[in-house]
Amino acid sequence: MSGIKKLAGQTIWYGGSSIAARFINYLLTPYLTYTLDDRSDYGKIGLIYAAIPLLNILFTYGFETAYFRFASKQENQRTIYSTASLSLFFSTIILSLVLWMNQHWLGEATGLIDFPTVIQMAIIIIGLDALSTIPFARLRQQGRPKKFAFIKVMGVLINIFFTWFFISYCPAALQSDPESWVKYIYDPANSPVHYVVLANVLQSAFTLLFLWSELTEIELRFDSRLWKQMMLYSLPLVIAGMGGMVNETLDRLMLNWWLPGTEEYKHSQVGIYNACFKLSILITLFIQAFRMAAEPFFFKQAEGKDPQKVYARVMKFFVITVCIMFLSVSLFLPAWQYLIGPEYREGLGIVPMLLFANMFLGIYYNLSIWYKLGNKTIAGAYITIIGALVTMVINYAFIPTYGYLACAWAHFASYGVMMVVSYTWGQKEYRVPYAWKKLLAYLVIVALLFFVHLGIQKISNNIYVHLAASVALTLVFIFIAGSVEKKELRRLPFFRKSGAQGPI
C-alpha cells in the first residue's frame, strides 16, 4: 500500500494545486456569464480556447510524457532535460512563425476572422505555454510540488486579476473620469473577448518568469541520438493527443461550423454549451490532478515488484472516487447551476451526460499505462483516432438537428468506446488484474441512483425533499462501496493508525 499512499500524497500536492488553480480560474465562469452583456461573447471565448489546446498538442508533440519516460530510466538527467528543452525551444519559434504568417487560417477555423488581435494573442499564449512545458515536467519529475503549486496558483490569480481589471475596473474608471490613466492601456472599442485573452497572455508570461530558475538550468547540451529516441516515442502521442483534444474541445468549433443559423446565434449556442460544460469540471479537475501525479508514479512503479496489483488497486479507488463526485454534482445540480448566469441554464440537461463521459475518460487514462510502459504509444494513437472519429461522426450527423445536445452524446459515446477498446487491447498486451465486474457494478449503481433521483424530482417539487434525497442517495453509494471494500480500506495507513485491524 506504500505505493498508493505515495500516489495519494502526490495527487494531493500536484492535484490539489491544479484543482485549486483551475477552481480559482473557474470563478471566471460565473463572473463572465453574469458580467458579459452578450452571451455570444462567451461563445467566442469558448471558440478561441477550443483552438488553443489543439495547437498546444502540436507545439509540445508529446515531449512531456517522453521526458518522464526517459528520465525515469536514465541517469544523465541534465542531458535529458536540456535536450528536451532545446528541442521545444527551437520548434516553438519555428511553429509560432508559421502560425503567425497563417493567422487568417486560425481566424477562419474559429469563426473569429474579424478579431485579428485576439488571434495574434492566442498564438503568443500557445508559444509561451509550450516553453513552460518541460520546466513544469522537471518540477514534477524531481518531486517539487510546492513550487509547482505556487506557480500554478499564482498564474491563475494573475489571470483573474487582469480579467477583472480590464472587464470591470477599466470601463468604470473611464466612465467616472474620461481622462483617467486607464485610457492609455484600455480601449472601450475593443471587445471583452480581447481583454479576456490579453489577461491570459499576461498569465503565461508571468508563469514563464516564475520558472526562470528551471530555465537557467538548461544547458547547451543536445544529444541527437537521445532526441531521436524521444521523438520516436513521442510522435504517436501527438496523434493520441490530437485525438483526445478533438474529443475534448473541438466540439465547440464543430458546433459553430455545422449548426444552422446566424453567426450570433451560433456563438450564443456555443456560449451556452461552454458554460454548462464547465459544470462537469469537478470530475475533470480530479482526473487532471490524478493524471499529473499518476504518470510519473506509474513509470516508477513499473520498476518495482508486481506493479500490476498496484495499478489495479489504484483503478478501484479511482472509480469509487469519481462515482462519488458524479453524484455530488449531478444530484445537487439545482445548487451548482448558480455558478453560471441565468441565460445559460437552458443547457443544464447535458451536464450529467458530460459527467459520465468524463468518468469514462478518467478510466481510460488509468488503462493507458499498458501502451506507455510497453513503448507502444502508437496504440494510444489508434485508440484516440477511433474516439475522434466517433466524436466527429456523431457531431456531423446530429448537430444540425440537436445542437449542443449532440456534442454531449458524442462525448459520452467517444470516451466509452475508447475505454472499452483500451481495456480489451491492453489486457492482451499487459494484463492487469482489474476487478472489472466490481467496477462496472459501481458505474451501474450510480447511474441507477441518478435515475431514482430524477423520479423523485418528478414526484415532488419540494426543494427540501430533493436535497434530502440527494444526500441519502450519495450516502447509499458510499455505504455500498465502503461495505464492499471494507477489507481493502482497512489496509490503508489512515485506518491502521486509527486502530482498525487488517492485514498489512
Image: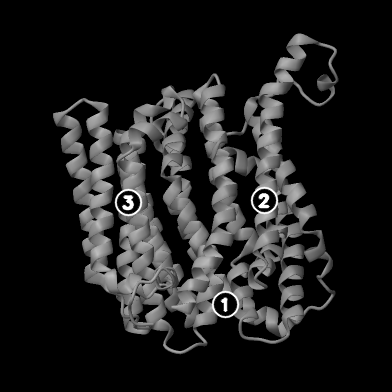
Q: Residue at x 65, y 33 (%)?
A: 196
* Quarter of the figure with the N terminus: bottom left
Q: Residue at x 22, y 26 (%)?
A: 462
Alpha-carbon span between mark 2 and mark 3: 30 Å
Q: Which residue is mark 1?
A: 233
Q: Which residue is mark 2?
A: 126
The type of residue carrying mark 2 is Ile
Q: Residue at x 23, y 39 (%)?
A: 469
- The quarter holding residue 359 reads bottom left
Q: Is residue 25 rendered to the left or right of residue 475?
A: right
Mark 1 burial class by Cα count in 10 Å: few <14, some 14-19, many 20+: many
> Does residue 123 sit above or below 486 in this rendering?
above
Q: Earlier in the sequence, mark 1 or mark 3?
A: 1
Question: Residue 132: horizontal and vertical position, in percent?
Answer: 71, 59
- The quarter holding residue 450 reads top left
Q: Earlier in the sequence, mark 2 or mark 3?
A: 2
- What is the secondary structure assignment of the residue under circle 3? helix
Q: Which residue is mark 3?
A: 356
Can I make out residue 294 in this image?
A: yes
> Does residue 187 sit above or below 278 in this rendering?
above
Alpha-carbon span between mark 1 and mark 3: 31 Å
